[in-house]
């Protein structure tokens, strides 16, 4: 892995040098990993998550670490390890990455000031703006938007090292998904399924790239369901499991969703799941360079409409369903998002590196990326089909509502819905499905 990582660092050097081109007054960039916060009125902190641009360089997830990037020079990693007997502050400097940096050991983050020259010509990236000002960095050089636009835009294009980490994160998560499915089919609760997932991935909750969604039955219709029920309501059994969960490897994230059903689930729901599995793979196969994510979203809406028409859940043509925006009632979210050191990686609405934006179209307001796909981007492809009362009830007595089979909807409401999600790399000739590789 050291060779791939070395090439990755070389690529980052070029990207940062290009991003500084034409920006007057900036000789280097100081990146801060972030601050550890404490709950209000308490001495406990939520799990820490390092800043994405710091993670892009270093596989370290610790607060108050600093990285100095100056074009033409080796990057300097200011490794802050405070003396502490309350918490473990050690950092493992692995051979495969440590040789790419000059490491300066500090006992406190404030000591970095002694090692910085020409502070007035440094840009600071990170959330700790008060700390940046204490170093003497001018306000206009703290998170300069024109520089961040360039860096955010470039982060969509993954190096071989990054693809390697994403593959590993997918492989680990798939072990968890297999264990979760087995637990569900054995009668496990949301809590049991969640714990089976963690154990199979050999991690704890705070290591997850996001709060895992472990939703049974009606809770599968809550898109970001956050709870893990110990038991289901009395006389209710697990008929549907929707689990959206990933892993992190060297700060790179996987994001995978699977839907599993019990053998005795409603026959129409079985057909729905079969139809969505076919639709999802069709959408994955559409991924290629030059395809706009907006067009992929439109294709997803068409696939959802086909599934609904085939189920006779909608009693009109696919074209009429699309014109009435009926698929959005069953899939209100976007088809996917950029993936990397953040689950929802940055730059999804940037149309270029200078900060011009391409907003989602009015009919798809929650689309997280509107970019045109390019080789070595990694996106998620995650169509869904849900029975959400808040969206469906308002149209029951409208002209558009006459196209929907409401008795069937009411029979399926308690089953929540379906989502299937893979992580897909754009290749020169099409796509590589990292989740099913």
Image (cartoon, helix red, strand yellow):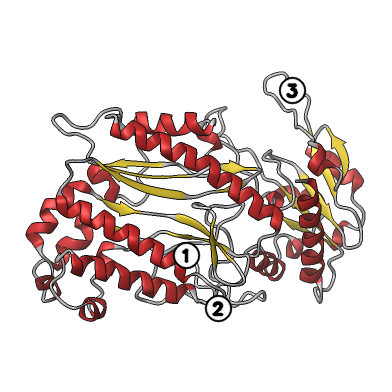
* Residue 165, above or below 38: below
Q: Give residue 403's position: percent from left, percent from top.
A: 12, 72
Tell me where residue 400 sits by quadrant.
Answer: bottom left
Asked whether, in this view, residue 280 is left or right of residue 91, the answer is: left
Q: Nearer the viewer, mark 3 or mark 1?
A: 1
Instruction: State the residue position of label 1.
Output: 368
The CA span between labels 3 and 1 is 41 Å
| Of the image marks 3 and 2, the number of the one nearer the N terminus | 3
Name the residue at 21% across, 80% down: 320
Name the residue at 17% across, 46% down: 414
Q: Nearer the viewer, residue 150 or 160?
A: 160
Q: Give residue 94's position: percent from left, percent from top.
A: 78, 36
Tell me where residue 114 sits by quadrant.
Answer: top right
Q: Give residue 19's position: percent from left, percent from top.
A: 76, 69
Asked whether, in this view, residue 129 is left or right of residue 66, the answer is: left
Instruction: State the residue position of label 2.
Output: 290
The CA span between labels 3 and 2 is 52 Å
């Amino acid at each position: 892995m050291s060779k791939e990582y070395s090439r990755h660092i070389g690529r980052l050097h070029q990207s940062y040098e290009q991003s500084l081109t034409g920006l007057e007054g900036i000789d280097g960039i100081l990146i801060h990993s972030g601050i550890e916060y404490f709950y209000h009125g308490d001495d406990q902190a939520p799990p820490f998550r390092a800043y994405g641009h710091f993670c892009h360089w270093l596989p370290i997830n610790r607060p108050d670490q600093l990285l100095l990037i100056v074009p033409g020079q080796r990057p300097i990693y200011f490794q802050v390890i405070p003396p502490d007997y309350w918490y473990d502050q050690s950092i493992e400097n692995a051979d495969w990455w440590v040789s790419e940096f000059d490491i300066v050991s500090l006992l406190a983050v404030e000591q970095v000031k002694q090692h910085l020259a020409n502070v007035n010509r440094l840009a600071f990236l990170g959330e700790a703006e008060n700390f940046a000002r204490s170093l003497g960095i001018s306000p206009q050089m703290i998170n300069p938007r024109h520089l961040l636009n360039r860096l955010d835009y470039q982060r969509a294009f993954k190096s071989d090292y990054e693809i390697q980490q994403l593959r590993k994160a997918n492989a680990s998560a798939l072990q968890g998904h297999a264990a979760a499915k087995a637990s569900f089919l054995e009668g496990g609760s949301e809590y049991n399924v969640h714990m089976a997932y963690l154990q199979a991935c050999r991690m704890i909750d705070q290591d997850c790239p996001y709060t895992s969604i472990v939703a049974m039955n009606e809770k599968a219709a809550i898109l970001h369901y956050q709870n893990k029920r110990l038991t289901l309501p009395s006389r209710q059994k697990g008929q549907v499991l929707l689990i959206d969960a990933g892993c992190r490897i060297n700060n790179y994230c996987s994001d995978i969703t699977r839907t599993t059903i019990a053998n005795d689930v409603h026959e129409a729901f079985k057909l729905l799941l079969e139809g969505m599995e076919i639709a999802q793979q069709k959408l994955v196969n559409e991924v290629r360079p030059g395809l706009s994510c907006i067009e992929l979203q439109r294709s997803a809406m068409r696939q959802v409409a086909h599934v609904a028409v085939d189920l006779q859940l909608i009693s009109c043509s696919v074209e009429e369903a699309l014109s009435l925006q009926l698929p959005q009632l069953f899939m209100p979210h976007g088809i996917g998002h950029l993936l990397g050191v953040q689950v929802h990686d940055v730059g999804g609405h940037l149309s270029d590196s200078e900060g011009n934006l391409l907003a989602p179209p009015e009919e798809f307001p929650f689309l997280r990326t509107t970019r045109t796909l390019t080789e070595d981007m990694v996106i998620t492809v995650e169509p869904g089909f849900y029975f959400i009362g808040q969206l469906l009830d308002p149209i029951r007595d409208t002209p558009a509502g006459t196209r929907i089979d409401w008795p069937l909807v009411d029979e399926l409401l308690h089953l929540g819905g379906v989502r299937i999600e893979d992580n897909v790399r754009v290749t020169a000739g099409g796509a590589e499905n990292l989740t099913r590789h």
